[in-house]
């Protein structure tokens, strides 16, 4: 199993504002869908609250301390990232999809990062700065701001070394 983290980060480390994404990036959403389709999505409860429903073609696992959290049929609850990964053991590449605390907890277990670097300083209240010591960049691709994108981005893939 290759544990993947998928995250979009502004140049000042912002990943969210007021419980949501503080940008509109159609290109990034299409990439997210293409990469995660058919896989497990592991997310924290606050991220789940923002998403609000299972995404089609993916199996959702919500990491929460609230075992009584009401979720739709087919959505699973886990008390930890480790438990979520056990629930996703049949998946060759489960995706950790946020938020900041879940990213921090998953970092030691991750093998791959799918990172979208947003080339703008954006106001926000949720931050994440990955530490890429012990990682190598395996892919990079620049995308200018398009008709449905507020900012230019760079898609990167990072692989753990050793």
Image (spheres, rainbow, N blue to C red):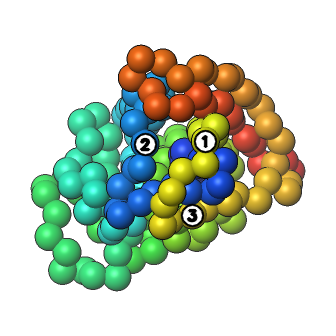
22 vs 94, nearest the viewer: 22
Q: Please tell me which residue is depicted at 77% across the width and 32% down the height of the picture.
A: 138
Q: Secondary structure at mark 2?
A: loop
> Residue 35, image x and y in percent?
48, 31
Residue 127 x %, y %: 57, 63
Q: Secondary structure at mark 3?
A: strand
Q: Which residue sits at x=65%, y=30%?
A: 154
Observer-side mark, 2 or 3, equals 2
Within 10 Å of disc 3 (Cα), the crowding (few <14, some 14-19, many 20+) is: some
Contact between marks 2 and 3 (CB within 8 A): the answer is: no
- Give x and y (percent) for residue 15: 51, 55
Q: Residue at x 65, y 54 (%)?
A: 12
Q: Is residue 61 visible?
A: no
Kindly identify which residue carries mark 3: 127
Residue position for label 2: 23
Residue 142, quarter of the rendered image: top right
Please give left or right for residue 112 compared with residue 42 in the image: right
- Residue count near mark 2 (Cα–Cα under 10 Å), binned few <14, some 14–19, many ≥20: some
Measured in 3D between alpha carbons, the distance from the residue under mark 1 to the one under mark 3, in whole angstroms, is 14 Å
State the SS at label 1: loop
Tell me, for residue 160, which label it has, or none.
none
40 relative to 106 in the view: left or right: left
Question: Is label 2 in contact with label 1 (beta carbons under 8 Å)?
Answer: yes
Sequence-wise, which precedes: disc 2 or disc 3?
A: 2
Crowding near the residue tagged with mark 1, few <14, some 14–19, many ≥20 C-alpha atoms within 10 Å: some
* Residue located at (26% from left, 62% from top): 49
Q: x%, y% of residue 55?
A: 26, 42
Direction top: furthest residue:
147
Foreground residue among 125 and 89: 125
Instruction: Look at the picture and state if 112 lies above or below 77.
Output: above
- Residue at numbered disc 1: 120
Q: CA distance from mark 2 to mark 3?
A: 14 Å
């Amino acid at each position: 199993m290759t544990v993947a983290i998928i995250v979009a980060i502004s140049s000042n480390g912002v990943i969210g504002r007021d419980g949501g994404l503080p940008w509109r990036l159609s290109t990034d959403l299409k990439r997210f869908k293409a990469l995660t389709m058919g896989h497990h999505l592991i997310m924290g409860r606050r991220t789940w609250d923002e998403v609000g429903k299972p995404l089609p073609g993916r199996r959702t696992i919500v990491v929460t301390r609230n075992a009584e959290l009401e979720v739709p049929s087919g959505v699973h609850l886990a008390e930890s990232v480790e438990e979520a990964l056990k629930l996703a053991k049949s998946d060759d590449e489960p995706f950790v999809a946020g938020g900041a605390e879940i990213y921090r907890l998953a970092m030691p277990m991750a093998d791959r990062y799918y990172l979208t670097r947003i080339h703008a300083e954006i106001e926000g209240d949720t931050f994440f700065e990955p530490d890429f010591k012990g990682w190598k960049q395996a892919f990079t691709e620049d995308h200018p701001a398009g008709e449905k994108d507020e900012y230019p981005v760079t898609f990167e893939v990072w692989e753990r070394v050793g």
